[in-house]
Image: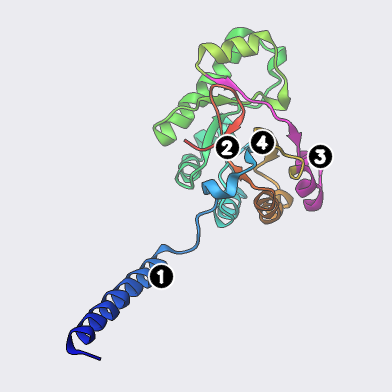
């Protein structure tokens, strides 16, 4: 090998070695792929929602399960629970969840007057804003009970009313397997009803996450424009 060729060969080896070193460093620091990348979401987005929180007995466990499994969700909080547990509302926000309004005392809104409904929603708006600095833009009526008066009050307060397509029935004592089966029905844009308080629901989270991944679906946000699940903004 001539001297000139040997020098060029040595330089090429050095450049290649440096490139491999950079690639190795990048791989080591990048960590695992983030759940919910564009490639993972070919089939679209679904809305995971949890009502009736926050509560000291279960909210932290639920948030840990969601984060561990790379999921984000909308937490429809009862206002008096938010008022009594502001640190848990902030924990929801800090875990990447969206916080919605589920009235202050969880009443049957269809039996209430316009001013009573407005009080229920406004007090919850204030409780969440005091805890996080931001008022909700989404509202879910307790029991899914709504009418023209409820919808009108929500609109006046700038709230989008959100119901659901799939009911997990965790509130009715559904088992973990039944909750997982319910979530398996979700399709692009759809929303599932779950609740903050049940250990069976928390236990279902890893299987729900695995099922969504296997079907090319991701947990998204609920659009204030349409009330449907979309890619996170």
Q: Toward which corner of the image does residue 50 lie, by quadrant? A: top right
Q: Is residue 25 left or right of residue 77?
A: left
Question: Percent x, y for residue 156?
Answer: 52, 11
- Which mark identifies residue 28? 1
As for residue 12 lying within the magenta part, the answer is no
Instruction: Decide: is 32 above or below 64.
Output: below
User: Label 2 to label 3, Cα distance in Å?
Assistant: 21 Å
For the record, the magenta segment spans 159-182
How packed is label 1: few (under 14 Cα within 10 Å), some, or many (20 or more)? few
The residue under the point 70% across, 12% down is 147
152 or 31, nearer to the observer: 31
Looking at the image, tell me whether mark 2 or mark 4 is earlier in sequence order.
2
Question: Percent x, y for residue 84?
Answer: 52, 37
The residue under the point 52% across, 35% down is 99
- Which mark identifies residue 60? none
According to the picture, the residue beneath numbered tag 4 turns out to be 188
According to the picture, the residue beneath numbered tag 2 turns out to be 74
């Amino acid at each position: 090998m001539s001297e000139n060729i040997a020098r060029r060969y040595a330089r090429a080896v050095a450049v290649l070695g440096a490139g491999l070193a950079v690639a190795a460093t990048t791989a080591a620091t990048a960590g695992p792929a983030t759940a919910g990348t564009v490639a993972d979401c070919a089939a679209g987005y679904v809305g995971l929602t949890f009502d009736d929180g926050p509560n000291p007995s279960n909210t932290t466990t639920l948030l840990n399960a969601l984060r561990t499994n790379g999921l984000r969700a909308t937490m429809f909080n009862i206002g008096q629970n938010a008022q009594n547990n502001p640190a848990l509302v902030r924990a929801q926000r800090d875990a990447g969840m969206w916080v919605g309004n589920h009235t202050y005392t969880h009443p049957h809104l269809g039996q209430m007057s316009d001013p009573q409904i407005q009080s229920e929603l406004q007090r919850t708006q204030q409780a969440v804003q005091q805890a996080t600095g931001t008022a909700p833009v989404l509202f879910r009526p307790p029991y899914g009970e709504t009418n023209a008066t409820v919808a009108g009050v929500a609109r006046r307060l700038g709230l989008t009313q959100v119901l659901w397509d799939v009911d997990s029935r965790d509130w009715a004592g559904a088992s973990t397997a039944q909750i997982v089966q319910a979530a398996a029905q979700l399709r692009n844009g759809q929303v599932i009803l779950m609740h903050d308080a049940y250990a069976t629901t928390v236990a279902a989270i890893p299987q729900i996450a695995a099922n969504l991944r296997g079907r090319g679906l991701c947990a998204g946000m609920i659009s204030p424009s349409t009330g449907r699940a979309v890619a996170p903004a």
